[in-house]
Amino acid sequence: MPEFYNPSGETQKHGVKLPHWQQGEVIQFITFRLADSMPRTKLRQWQEELVVWKTQHPEPWTNETEQEYHRKFTWRLENWLDEGHGACIFTDPDKRDILQRTLMHDQGTKANHHAWVIIPNHIHLLFTPLVPLEKLMQSWKGISARRIGLGSIWQPNYRDTLIRDASHFANAVRYIRRNPAKLKEGTFTLWQSKRAKAI
């Protein structure tokens, strides 16, 4: 089974508003966040700008257009997340532990984790899905929310990226590792596989 994305290979898509892609057991980089982690005014402005930009840049995109998209939209969202908006419930080590145990319960059966970091209001994951991605995300979010006991804590969606090659994999590992650099010790949990630690 190939572990990196093949542009000419068959890709499964699910989700209407924001399509999610899965190509067998190709490695995924996923970000999902708490429902209160993004200021609504900023998010509304971002969505309006995205609609206009996508109208002006129909797919398929060139590499340059894709880079522009990530610069204008993906990394802007990431920067807002890192500002620490919302209740930031994962500063609590007990709540991080619940999410960690939920993720690692499926290690080797439904997913092979390579690296992840739980930070106060969101999580980044690098893993190989062994089951349909949609079911995996529903399971992780649903089980962790029930165990934490604060109601519907997660945003309805998530951001996914299929990993293209070994260089892309290494960059994702480094991003996860560096993401909590500005946070206080004890407010995040970083986990890395042996393969990730070698990078």
Image: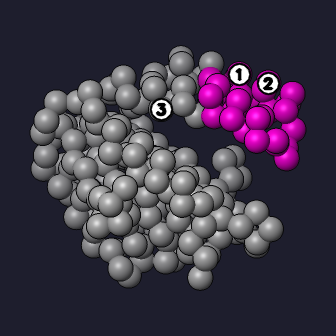
Decide: few, some or many residues near mark 1? Use Cα within 10 Å; few <14, some 14-19, many ≥20.
Answer: few
Sequence-wise, which precedes: disc 3 or disc 1?
Answer: 1
Sequence-wise, which precedes: disc 3 or disc 2?
Answer: 2
Amino acid type assigned to the residue bearing label 3 in the image: Glu
Badges 1 and 2: C-beta atoms under 8 Å apart?
yes
Q: Nearer the viewer, mark 3 or mark 1?
A: 3
Question: Which residue appears at 87% of the width and 27% of the height?
Answer: 56
Majority secondary structure of magenta residues: helix
Spatial CA span between label 1 and label 2: 5 Å
Spatial CA span between label 3 and label 2: 20 Å
Question: Which residue appears at 76% of the width and 73% of the height?
Answer: 10
Camera-nearest residue between 89 and 53: 53
Does 109 appear above or below 162? Answer: below
Decide: few, some or many residues near mark 3? Use Cα within 10 Å; few <14, some 14-19, many ≥20.
Answer: few
Residue 139 got which mark?
none
Q: Nearer the viewer, mark 3 or mark 2?
A: 3
Q: How far from the left and from the top, in percent, is residue 62?
A: 82, 41
The residue that disc 2 covers is: 52
The residue that disc 3 covers is: 78
Residue 20 placement: quadrant: bottom right
Does 190 appear above or below 185? Answer: below
Range covered by the magenta-colored residues? 46-73
Amino acid type assigned to the residue bearing label 2 in the image: Val
Amino acid type assigned to the residue bearing label 1 in the image: Glu
Question: Which residue appears at 12% of the width and 50% of the height?
Answer: 94
Q: Horizontal placement of 45 versus 84: left or right?
A: right
The residue that disc 1 covers is: 49
Badges 3 and 1: C-beta atoms under 8 Å apart?
no
Q: How far from the left and from the top, in percent, is residue 155?
A: 46, 43
Whether the magenta-drawn stretch holds residue 78 is answered as no
